[in-house]
Amino acid sequence: MTSTEPSPTIAAEHARLTNTLPFHDSRDHELADRGFLGTIDPMIIRNEAGDVVWDGQSYDFLGGEAPTSVNPSLWRQSTLVAKHGLYEVVDGIYQVRGFDLSNVTFVESDSGVIVIDPLISAETAAAALALYRQHRGHREVRAVIYTHSHIDHFGGVFGVTTEEEVDAGAVAVIAPDGFVEHAVEENVYAGTAMGRRAGYMYGAALARGPEGQVGAGLGQTTSRNGTVGLIPPTLTITRTGESHVIDGVPIEFQMAPGTEAPAEMHFFFPGYRALCMAENATHNLHNLLTLRGALVRDPHVWSRYLTEAIDVFADRADVVFASHHWPTRGHDEIVSFLSTQRDLYAYLHDQTLRMLNTGLTGTEIAEIIQLPPALENAWNARGYYGSVSHNVKAVYQRYMGWFDGNPARLWPHPPAEQAKRYVDAMGGIDRVVTLARTAFDGGDYRWAAALLDHAIFTDADHAAARELYAQTLTQLGYGSENGTWRNFFLSGATELQSGSFGTPQSTSAPTIVAQLTPEQLLDAFAITVDGPKAWDLDLVTDLTFTDLGRSFRVTLRNGVLIYLEREPGSDAALHLSLTKARMIALAAGDTSSPGLQIDGDAGVLESLFSVLDPGDPDFEIVLP
């Protein structure tokens, strides 16, 4: 990407923040450094083929005063999050931080160690386990706990254990109720679109440095080129108050569904007086609707579960740790930290509802809402990953949907058609670029971006519009306190100048797809049917999973694939017999390998595959 200097507008805003926020408060730096035992050097982790999976030393530029090209508050957060190595939480609990987007935690048990959240990739998880063993001795893994259903908390499980060890009962795998369902659905159903947008969100294609990617607030970025997997739980936690002793370690569980993840839980180690808050209490404002896409989260229940955690655990805890960032220590500090996090989500929820009930829209509320000074000045409540702006819009969307009630906005033209009309109304694309240049020179980058978006959606090859748009998005990126906003803006600028970088990493790993139930597999088929192409098809197939002893009647009619569990019948034109694993291969387009028994009209299968559209992992975002 062509280098762009920060503008005077950005420099002035950064100076204002520097003089406003409590940068004199160094407690987070002390807490993030506390308990450091060592790291690896060089801080580079590779896969078997030699490809880099994680490069922690690419962030060595962080430190000292913030350059003008980075929001000083985000620079502070990135400097904290980029710290890497093994840290003692308490005697017997250790975290490896900075080896992936998330933390992995090791809890020492009677005969080994319990692993909490084994990162995204097997390679980063294995490196973390090796570092732990280097300092604490070779302890066998006795259990793995998944705090919730996002991939950075289970994807690296094969770096710490094997399917064989779990099947043999040597290693327990513990997860909250609904974990497998939500983990596989999120990575398969909308995985193509989420993966493409995640490349923007985490700045996957951006160079590391003061003019590029400096982090994502919650963590620096995601590992890539690694081995992603999933081992289903052997113990599912279903209720708050449930307790288990795992290899001599008592654990008390608190369910927290529908918070940061659809399936999530907190848990307390009374023997260590340590509370794990999963991803519901971290050192930033989290997402209520992540920019990569997800179900809208519920800040109301989020705040309630934090209140419950304070009530049930705070008086017994000496330390709180989470799946991201650094621990909080001491009773008063723990209560303050959890209360601030609780109040943050409750305030956004309640005030958004208050204002929407006066007739304000989500966009309007996002512009005028103000946090109380105590939250505004709390570092752990700053919007490094989620933002007040897009979280307020998420609350509005959760209750009111996409429509703001104004009939003029009920049926607008789609972006490209709308752009043509706006550009024509403003006197043509050259005139629009001139107006955008005036806005840019005046520091109104939001208006410049809106104008140039219309220009590009009218003529994607207009050189002056593309260059000014890239410069505009770069300035917006430089000014962003939110790490994911910065990455989105700079990724857009990169694609304007260099073309689409596609989807850097797919989350639909074979071991994740293998956990799909027959119903979920058929759902995955259904969402790839190109409706208009299938309008005239009327197909009836019986499908038998030979390894599961289950059969389904599958019909395609009116462009809709429907299934019903029932025994095969003579009225079906086609009967397929196969294992679930062979069905997964069939879903990927393999119609010729052994293991697929076809009885009846094979043309039915050919007709079905002719109308499937698997999606495009390289679709345009910033261009039409």
Image (spheres, rainbow, N blue to C red):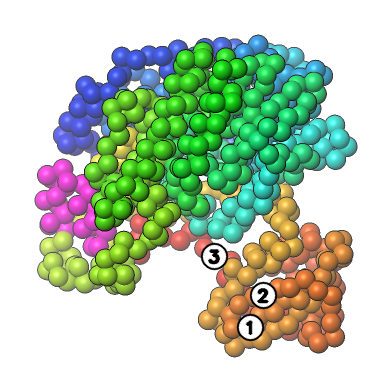
The amino acid beneath tag 2 is Ile
The reply to whether the C-beta atoms of the residues labelled 1 and 3 are less than 8 Å apart is no
Q: CA distance from mark 2 to mark 3?
A: 20 Å
* In this view, the mark in front (1 or 3): 1
| Figure quadrant of residue 248 | top right
Q: Viewed as shown, does residue 25 lie left or right of 299?
A: left
Q: Quadrant of the N terminus?
A: top left
Query: What's the residue at 23%, 62% (across, down)?
Result: 455
Mark 2 = which residue? 562
In the rendered image, the vertical position of residue 316 relative to residue 539, given as above or below:
above
The disc placed on residue 615 is: 3
Residue 541 x/y as whole percent: 76, 79
Query: What's the residue at 26%, 53% (across, down)?
Result: 358
Magenta-tinted stretch:
433-455
First in residue order: circle 1 vs circle 3: 1
Query: Local crowd at mark 3 within 10 Å, few (<14), some, or many (≥20)?
Result: few
Mark 1 = which residue? 557
